[in-house]
Amino acid sequence: MNNVLKYLKERENIDSIESEYGFATFLISGDECYLRDIWTDDKYRHKSFASVLADQVCDIAREKGCKFLTGTVCPKANNSTTSLKVLLGYGMQLIDSKENLIIFKKDL
């Protein structure tokens, strides 16, 4: 685990998974698994590797008894339009928005 992911675990109890093509961070709380971040290296983008990571997070969440997956997009962040498309393409539904945050949900 790289130092940034160790830091997130220590500071905020954020779990993570890593592979040769990227990483995902997530937080499990009761029935919810919040998929906080997915990042893939440039050479793996647009090749469904982000979905592979999301699927792995969903498997972990189901094993821990989660009923749904949530994710967010900050409209002011770089590449936010792409992030929106990715979440919608992954089957997530828009459920709420707050200032600079769009919230999505998917049943597991």
Image: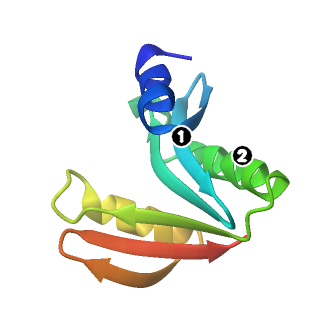
Measured as percent of width and height from the top left, residue 38 is found at 47, 44
Residue type for callout 2? Gln
The image quarter containing residue 16 is: top right
Report the quarter where the C terminus lies.
bottom right
Is the C-beta separation of discs 2 and 1 under 8 Å? yes
Q: Can you tell which mark lies on residue 24?
A: 1
- SS for callout 1: strand
Q: Can you tell which mark lies on residue 56?
A: 2
- SS for callout 2: helix
Measured as percent of width and height from the top left, residue 24 is found at 53, 40
Distance, label 2 to label 1, CA atoms, is 9 Å
Looking at this view, is 9 or 80 the one in front? 9
Rendered residue at 48%/26% (across/down):
10
Measured as percent of width and height from the top left, residue 6 is found at 49, 21
Report the quarter where the N terminus lies.
top right
Rendered residue at 55%/28% (across/down):
21
Tell me if 45 is positioned left or right of 58 in this view: left
Looking at this view, is 51 or 8 the one in front? 8
Residue type for callout 1? Ala
